[in-house]
Amino acid sequence: MNSFLKKIFHHQDKNINSRVPFRLNIILFIVGALFIILVIQLAYLQVVNGNQYKAEVNRSDNSIKYGNVQRGMIYDSSGRVLVGNKAHQAIQYTKELGVTTNDLYNIANKLSKYLHVDSSALTSRQVAEYYLSNPDNLKAVESQLKLPANSTPDTQYNASLDKVQADKMYNNINNYKNAATIFQKMSGAYQLSTTFIKTTGVTNKELSEVGEHLTDMPGIQIGNSWTREYPNGNAIQSVVGTVSSEKTGLPVDRINTLLSQGYSRNDSVGQSYLEQEYEPALRGSKSQTLIKSGSLDKAVQQYGGQKGDNLQLTINSQFEKKLQSLVENAQMSGNSTGAYAVVMNPKDGSVVGMGGVNRNPKTGKLTPNALGTINSAITMGSVVKGATVSGALMDNVITPTNSTLTDKPILTGGIKKSSWFNHNGSANLPVDASTALEVSSNSYMMQLAMKEAKFHYFSGAPLTMNPDAFDIERGYFNQFGLGVKTGIDLPGETKGIQGPGGFSNIGKALDLSYGNYDGYTTMQVAQYISTIANGGYRIKPHVVQNIRASNKDGKLGRIKYSVTPDILNKVDMTPAQRKVVTDGFYKVVHGTSQYRTGIDLNQIKPEVSAKTGTAQTFYDKQSTVTLSLGSFAPSKNPQVVVALAIPNLPDDAESNNINLAKQIYAAYWKYVQSDKGLE
């Protein structure tokens, strides 16, 4: 038995010994194959995708911090500074990576010992947030809450805020306000973004003490901030607009858009008018600093930033200041609601000056409002009659050689309407188109409107005129810029006020023909007169002349962009037709009729061509008149257009518009352009 077992085991040992080398070879082969695969994979990672993975590491370890730069300045047409920047030393904070609310709490407490900030806008909730940023306070408050076990962290935190505010757990809020305000400002910063803690009014003592303790307050820095200043007075601010402050932050209605464009919450940004319209140019480009490993101690500036580009306006600041003064001192009384004036180059649409003032009829108080020239619609009166005559000429109801009609009272539908000099028909006289403008004939304009509507008029006839008359008249007015937006490079422009049409209002179509129905802005009147003065080209008005860089000395640099005349449409009139209108405007001032309306302007040199306007208006149910004027000079080679309006004057007001125009022309030739060599 034993010998038999020995034979068996001896046989098995021989089989095992024969299989060991084979198994070992297989294992060695597998290990070798895996090693080769590993080498290939390492080579692939290092050689083929090495740069990609290095970039990934850099993206996780390195970040970019952006810094503010000076906003571009705004200059007048002569290079005078209208809007500049005043530098202030400021205290700012840049949030590093991994900063906790408790870190902010500790930094705010330290900084509050050396820096005082305005805490008037601080809310009780913000105080509570500051209070709970202390972990001990948060733990103590949460222990007093009785919430369901499945309450979310947000629910617990909001309940804690409510309890802190309800129980007023901060013993003396005055002891917390300064630190809480600093904490709130710091909390608004994103990681590696910079926010201002105090932008203006930082005292020398505060600068010194904060500077001495910067190492104890990570992220706190001494920097610069800028606020807008107006060396030539604040009146221009109503045109250039405003910029948000650190205190107000980004405008609520645009905050998401601005954040997506790289703004911080308390960055300065244009809020209105030119500051908003040209924000992309004015803002500049922020500095860029590489932050390695999320630490401000390892910062390398990659780009120093670039100050915003400057705007150079078409407005002459000396003239603008004088124009505003003249408008404010215009003859206003009774229920007058203000005065507005626009001075424009008719050849290229550049606005040389725009002045405006609102007046409270009850108190007489005046408020500067130059933008009223683009957003206050006024019933202008007869100043629009040049467009009425032009429309009739283009419609061929009159021609340059056949335009005579009799000025007489118009009696239709039981209503009588007449010219100012012929109320009862005792001064009936034949007038051609130019003479109708000279004497400002309402009757002539109404007859043109009826002819355009193909209505056969006879005295006492019922007014069954086609309501299309409204569209016909307005269509011609629109070609000159009346009743449509001028396109000026300022936001907030209105297209005016259009009265209701239709057959039920058909009598108003006659009022429309002589300017006593729809409302237009003073800028529209300026564009309309410019279109007549320049030969029929409706040009978009503009107040920006150039966008310019800055020289090293900070002054105006090279031109980066120039505004060129933008022709919106060409009025399709022949030279002969245009001459009818320009002759009429000339005769308003220099004609021979005893009824010419602009005789007092004939004292101005160079010669002026004009159309006066008087509209019968109402204010607070009381009868008033609105006086207006559209004019250009010199008559033979127009260089400048003056348009103005003084709404809701007493009924007996007569020459307020003429007197203001004379003063404006005198100021223009003094401050803007020499009148030497001009006729």
Image: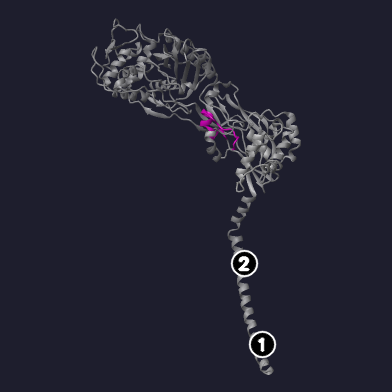
Residue 460: where, in percent of width, then height? 24, 12
Q: Residue at x 37, y 16 (%)?
A: 516
- Quadrant housing residue 271: top right
For mark 2, give the secondary structure. helix
Contact, CB < 8 Å: mark 1 with mark 2? no
For mark 1, give the secondary structure. helix
Residue 43: where, in percent of width, then height? 61, 63
- Quadrant housing residue 565: top left
Nearest to N terminus: mark 1 or mark 2: 1
User: What amino acid type should be assigned to the residue bearing mark 2?
Assistant: Val
The one nearer the camera, 336 or 3, is 3
Tell me how far mark 1 sits from mark 2, CA to CA: 40 Å
Residue designated by label 1: 13
Disc on res. 39:
2
Q: Is residue 341 left or right of residue 462?
A: right
Q: Is residue 636 left or right of residue 331?
A: left
User: What amino acid type should be assigned to the residue bearing mark 1?
Assistant: Asp
Please say if 450 is above or below 427: below
Please say if 501 is above or below 61: above
Q: Is residue 163 left or right of residue 397?
A: right
In the image, the segment drawn in magenta is 264-283
Residue 331: where, in percent of width, then height? 48, 10
The one nearer the camera, 498 or 622, is 622
Query: How many numbered marks, from 0 up?
Result: 2
Q: Is residue 661 visible?
A: yes
Alpha-carbon neighbours of circle 1 within 10 Å: few (<14), some, or many (≥20)? few
